[in-house]
């Protein structure tokens, strides 16, 4: 009797253990991530949870995914396969060392990704082809060899980058991504930038803010950048003050390599092209919209007229019915009006 009880107990405990191990581990992970909304977007926050991988049991309609302050070391091509609605992805302060090719490819709605404070040695090149990516934070990674990978990058890139943060990445020059007609803020502070060349700024025709503080730029480079920024009306607030104002002879700014360069002009032209394209898209949209409204209006009128016609027809039919003498009436009439032949007979 007691033995059976003991056995039952053992069975019960092992079943509970198995359930805990298999069933609830996932549930637990899912539970600890908090669900919420931010500006009408569906947000899941898995912040500082000691996660080692991207959890796969979250709601797939997530739009803002916060995986910051975890211990993720690797992003796999399957990591975000299920979450193609993500617009904002926060992966800062992890230990990401490698990213499998194709990891970011499913994220066609991605607008912002924060990969800062990781162990990356390059920028996953597929990020530059995401059609909606506007903001890229990759600061505090070791990108000293990035220029090798960038040689293979197809330019102009497909992503409409507006903000790029490559601060504290051991860079010796600002990364060459070809013309970036939408980029208005570039943060390259805390890099050596010993090979900085002002010509690169020709690619950035709509630059408004550039952070070059705590770099080892030469006084001449700094003078040239300041002159260039003044020339395009941008903010020189974060360019280190050039201690001694150098005269133009010592440090000439060759405008034909910046604002008068072919790259600067093609950057402007592509921005204009995008603008006219969006204007025409807008115009086409307006035209299409009004055409649709007109179509619906015509259809409604048509329906209304048809209904009215039908009503008239059915009314006419009803009216006509009044004049149809039913056979019974007819007999009755005949009975009343006509003299009975039998009687007369
Ligand atoms: C540039 O990035 C660094 C490091 O992330 C940050 O401390 C600094 O405030 C940024 N500069 C601007 C202008 O946002
Ligand atoms: C830019 O102008 C300078 C002289 O003002 C000239 O020596 C140089 O060849 C020009 N560079 C280009 C790329 O046209």
Image (spheres, rainbow, N blue to C red):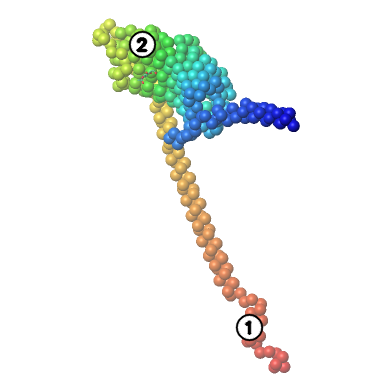
Can residue 64 be seen here? The reply is: yes
Q: Which residue is mark 2?
A: 215
| For residue 303, above or below residue 276 | below
In terms of depth relative to the viewer, which is nearer, 254 or 75?
75
Residue 190 location (% of width, % of height): 38, 13
Q: Earlier in the sequence, mark 1 or mark 2?
A: 2
Q: Nearer the viewer, mark 1 or mark 2?
A: 2
Instruction: For ligand 1, tell me if the residue under mark 1 lies within 8 Å.
Output: no
| For residue 240, above or below residue 323 | above
Q: Is residue 227 left or right of residue 186?
A: left
**Callout 2 secondary element:** loop
Q: How many marks?
A: 2
Q: Residue at x 35, y 17 (%)?
A: 211
Q: Is residue 129 left or right of residue 343?
A: left
Using the rendered view, name the quadrant where residue 31 is placed.
Answer: top right
Q: Quadrant of the C terminus?
A: bottom right
Q: Residue at x 49, y 19 (%)?
A: 94
Q: Which residue is mark 1?
A: 333
**Callout 1 secondary element:** helix
| For residue 261, above or below residue 290 | above
Other residues around mark 2 within 10 Å, as few (<14) / some (14–19) / many (≥20): many
């Amino acid at each position: 009797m007691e033995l059976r009880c003991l056995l039952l107990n053992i069975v019960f405990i092992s079943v509970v253990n198995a359930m805990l191990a298999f069933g609830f581990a996932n549930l637990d992970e899912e539970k600890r991530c908090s669900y919420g909304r931010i500006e009408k977007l569906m947000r899941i926050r898995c912040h500082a949870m000691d996660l080692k991988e991207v959890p796969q049991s979250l709601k797939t309609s997530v739009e803002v995914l916060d995986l910051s302050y975890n211990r993720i070391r690797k992003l796999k091509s399957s990591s975000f396969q299920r979450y193609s609605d993500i617009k904002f992805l926060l992966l800062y302060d992890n230990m990401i060392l490698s990213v499998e090719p194709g990891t970011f490819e499913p994220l066609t709605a991605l607008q912002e990704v924060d990969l800062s404070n990781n162990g990356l040695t390059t920028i996953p090149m597929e990020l530059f082809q995401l059609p909606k990516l506007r903001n890229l934070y990759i600061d505090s990674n070791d990108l000293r060899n990035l220029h090798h990978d960038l040689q293979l990058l197809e330019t102009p890139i497909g992503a409409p980058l507006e903000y790029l943060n490559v601060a504290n990445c051991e860079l010796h020059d600002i990364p060459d991504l070809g013309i970036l007609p939408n980029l208005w803020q570039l943060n390259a502070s805390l890099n050596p930038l010993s090979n900085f060349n002002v010509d690169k700024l020709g690619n950035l025709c709509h630059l408004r803010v550039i952070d070059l503080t705590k770099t080892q730029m030469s006084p001449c480079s700094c003078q040239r950048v300041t002159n260039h920024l003044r020339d395009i009306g941008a903010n020189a607030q974060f360019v280190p003050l050039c201690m001694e104002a150098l005269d133009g002879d010592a440090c000439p700014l060759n405008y034909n390599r910046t604002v008068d360069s072919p790259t600067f002009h093609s950057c402007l032209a592509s921005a204009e092209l995008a603008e006219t394209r969006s204007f025409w898209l807008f115009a086409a949209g307006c035209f299409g919209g009004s055409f649709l409204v007109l179509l619906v209006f015509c259809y409604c009128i048509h329906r209304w007229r048809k209904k009215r016609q039908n009503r008239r027809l059915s009314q006419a039919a009803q009216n006509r019915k009044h004049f149809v003498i039913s056979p019974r009436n007819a007999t009755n009439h005949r009975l009343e009006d006509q003299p009975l032949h039998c009687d007369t007979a």
